[in-house]
């Protein structure tokens, strides 16, 4: 911030450590642990630095337990960092929690912010009041969210009766009702079907185009490739990559895995494909790892067509764990 | 840039319209189950009435508890019980605060642009608990009517007694908030609340003079239940104390609330959240 770059989110040397008390086995152990200070120190987030300029769409990815949620919780003022400094919109989300809260939107995919037993419309009414949004503005925004997310059809339904996909769309709209300048989204597409994911991606793209800065944690490499101009990868609490998706691709590739099941064990040798494509055969199953940016799935299938009758093809999307493994190997 | 760097104070939004809206939402939430709303209000009132029946049985057996007869004790029991109902209506979420710590749902309180305690209390008002208040007020009225008839109370004393549940509810809210704040370190606080809140509340149904000194000391200081009924009623019935006793109740309620809130603000910075 000092150097005049208009970053709206910055983390400088941010760490968050947790002290996990060691609970011994059995009753004796449990009692003993009450009086002992022994335990393990977990470095959930360890000395992380980044600056996010206004209008960015950043993907924040990493394996389970990498520290993604802990980071989002610190950025949104829920947790206090053990060390380091965080600024959001020029303020510390810890010391100016309420002022920051008024200008950011937060969504946790795993839990809802809505009023469980009330019709959805009531949650919006309550949130508008809480954030001081004039009713006319709130109505206009809800109308617009309905156009993209289709939340209108279940506006009068109690939140607890909504499906996961419906609830997620409703939660997103709720987080945006006060037109926040910065959005922190923790796994907003987790467990959703293709249609719901697509609706949410369209929506996020539009919100970002309107000027909102978005940081999104996800497990879904598709989210990142379709939405994010920049990617931050963390593992074991440490930042291991910070750059664009093309840069990641150049450095380690973004691997897609295809399993081809043949009716009979295919004739060897297996076709020799371009460099960068790994082929491994195991009986009737052949596994191909490739980068979609360089080779299309159709070309690979074509190369295998004369090796025997294909019974089934299964494509698994780029796997974050695999990407992280490659970053370490590179 | 100028806009993003100005360190902020939250723009003030008026608190009361929001509180009103939230209270109405809470009522609506309850009304989703109309039958159970009425039934449970009645059942709560009735089950608490059993409490007083027990007190009354003891009094019937012994006639007096430390010089207090059943009508006088009704003046202790009634306001305490009415206060309990008010507190449990407003403090529903504070009472069950352990859930927020175990599930990590306190997260969703922290992301709102309001003081956390306010957002928390506003999350739900449980109007069912007014059954307890109604029952307490009935007991209080029965006792007071007899005492006025006996000339032990003046009619205008009743005005003050009518305010006691309010002061009491604030004391209970303070004690409960303090206990809940300990949860930021202890996580499990449901059992602790029995010690800090419910046991002392039950103790306040009887004249405090029957308890050993250490317990009385506790109820006059750390857990100031003495002031939700005993201290002012003692004076009103001419059993002791001075006119200061009437001021002590609201004063203690205010101080307890202020201290509890201070402690809450300190404690919430130690919130640990949970894994996702």
Image: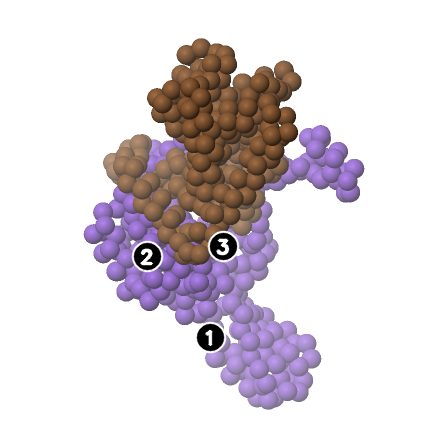
Chain colours: A purple, B brown
Determine the residue located farthest toward the front in the rendered image. Answer: B150
Q: Residue at x 54, y 59 (%)?
A: A320
Task: Tell me the residue that label 2 is attached to.
Answer: A121
Q: Residue at x 69, y 80 (%)?
A: A283
Q: Secondary structure at mark 2?
A: helix
Would residue B186 appear left or right of B251 to someone viewing this image?
right
Q: Nearer the viewer, residue A102 or B119?
A: B119
Q: How many residues crowd around disc 3 within 10 Å: few (fewer than 14), some, or many (20 or more)?
A: some
Q: Secondary structure at mark 1?
A: loop
* Callout 3: chain: A
Q: Give the image location of residue B75, x and y in percent.
A: 48, 26
* Circle nearer the viewer, 2 or 1: 2
Q: How many residues crowd around disc 1 within 10 Å: few (fewer than 14), some, or many (20 or more)?
A: few
The mark found on residue B237 in the picture is: none
Determine the residue located farthest toward the left in the rendered image. Answer: A136
* Callout 2: chain: A
Q: Residue at x 32, y 57 (%)?
A: A121
> Is A324 situated above or below B64?
below
Would residue A65 appear left or right of B129 to someone viewing this image?
right
Alpha-carbon span between mark 1 and mark 3:
34 Å
The mark found on residue A296 in the picture is: 1
Q: Are marks 2 and 3 on the same chain?
A: yes
* Circle nearer the viewer, 2 or 3: 2
Q: Give the image location of residue B276, x and y in percent.
A: 54, 50
The mark found on residue A110 in the picture is: 3
Q: Quadrant of the C terminus of chain A?
A: bottom right
Q: Quadrant of the N terminus of chain A?
A: top left
> Is B44 situated above or below A156?
above
Alpha-carbon span between mark 2 and mark 3:
21 Å
Q: Nearer the viewer, residue A248 or B56?
A: B56
Q: Secondary structure at mark 3?
A: loop
């Amino acid at each position: 911030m000092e150097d005049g770059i208009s970053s709206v989110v910055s983390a400088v040397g941010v760490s968050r450590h947790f002290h996990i008390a060691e609970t011994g086995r059995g009753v004796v152990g449990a009692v003993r642990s009450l009086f002992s200070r022994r335990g393990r120190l977990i470095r959930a987030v360890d000395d992380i630095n980044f600056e996010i300029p206004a209008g960015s769409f950043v993907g924040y990815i990493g394996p389970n337990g990498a520290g993604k949620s802990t980071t989002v919780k610190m950025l949104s003022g829920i947790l206090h960092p053990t060390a380091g400094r965080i600024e959001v919109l020029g303020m510390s989300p810890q010391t100016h929690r309420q002022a920051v809260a008024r200008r950011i939107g937060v969504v946790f995919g795993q839990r809802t912010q809505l009023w469980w037993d009330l019709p959805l419309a009531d949650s919006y009414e309550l949130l508008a009041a809480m954030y001081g949004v004039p009713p006319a503005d709130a109505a206009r925004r809800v109308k617009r969210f309905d156009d993209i997310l289709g939340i209108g059809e279940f506006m009068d339904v109690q939140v607890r009766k909504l499906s996961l996909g419906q609830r997620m769309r409703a939660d997103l709209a709720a987080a945006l009702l006060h037109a926040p300048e910065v959005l922190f989204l923790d796994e907003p597409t987790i467990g959703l079907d293709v249609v719901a994911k697509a609706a949410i991606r369209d929506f996020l793209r539009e919100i970002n185009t309107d000027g909102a800065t978005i940081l999104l944690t996800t497990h879904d490499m598709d989210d990142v490739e379709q939405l994010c101009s920049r990617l931050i990868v963390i593992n074991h609490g440490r930042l291991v990559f910070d750059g664009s998706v093309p840069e990641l691709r150049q450095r380690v590739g973004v691997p897609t895995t295809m399993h081809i099941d043949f009716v009979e064990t295919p004739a060897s040798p297996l076709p020799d494909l371009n460099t960068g494509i790994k082929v491994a055969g195991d009986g009737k199953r052949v596994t191909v790892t490739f980068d979609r940016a360089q080779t299309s799935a159709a070309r690979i299938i074509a190369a295998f067509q004369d090796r025997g009758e294909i019974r089934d093809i299964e494509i698994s999307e780029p796997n974050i764990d695999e990407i992280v493994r490659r970053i370490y190997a590179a | 840039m100028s806009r993003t760097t100005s360190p902020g104070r939250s723009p003030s939004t008026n608190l009361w319209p929001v509180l009103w809206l939230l209270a109405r939402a809470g009522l609506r939430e309850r009304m989703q189950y109309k039958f159970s709303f009425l039934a449970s209000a009645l059942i709560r009132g009735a089950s608490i009435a059993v409490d007083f029946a027990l007190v009354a049985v003891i009094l019937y057996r012994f006639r007096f508890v430390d010089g207090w007869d059943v009508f006088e004790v009704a003046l202790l029991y009634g306001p305490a019980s009415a206060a309990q109902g008010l507190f449990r209506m407003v403090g529903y979420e504070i009472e069950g605060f352990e859930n927020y710590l175990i599930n990590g749902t306190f997260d969703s309180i922290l992301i709102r642009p309001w003081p956390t305690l306010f957002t928390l209390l506003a999350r739900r008002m449980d109007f069912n608990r007014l059954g307890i208040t109604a029952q307490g007020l009935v007991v209080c009225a029965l006792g007071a009517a007899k005492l006025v008839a006996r000339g032990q109370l003046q009619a205008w004393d009743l005005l003050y007694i009518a305010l006691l549940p309010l002061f009491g509810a604030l004391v209970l809210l303070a004690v409960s908030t303090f206990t809940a704040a300990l949860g930021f370190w202890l996580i499990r606080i449901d059992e602790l609340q029995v010690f800090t809140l419910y046991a002392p509340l039950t103790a306040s149904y009887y004249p405090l003079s029957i308890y050993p000194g250490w317990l009385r000391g506790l109820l006059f200081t750390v857990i100031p239940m003495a002031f939700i009924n005993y201290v002012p009623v003692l004076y009103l019935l001419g059993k002791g104390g001075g006119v200061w006793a009437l001021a002590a109740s609201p004063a203690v309620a205010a101080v307890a609330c202020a201290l509890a809130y201070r402690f809450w603000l300190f404690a919430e910075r130690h919130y640990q959240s949970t894994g996702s």
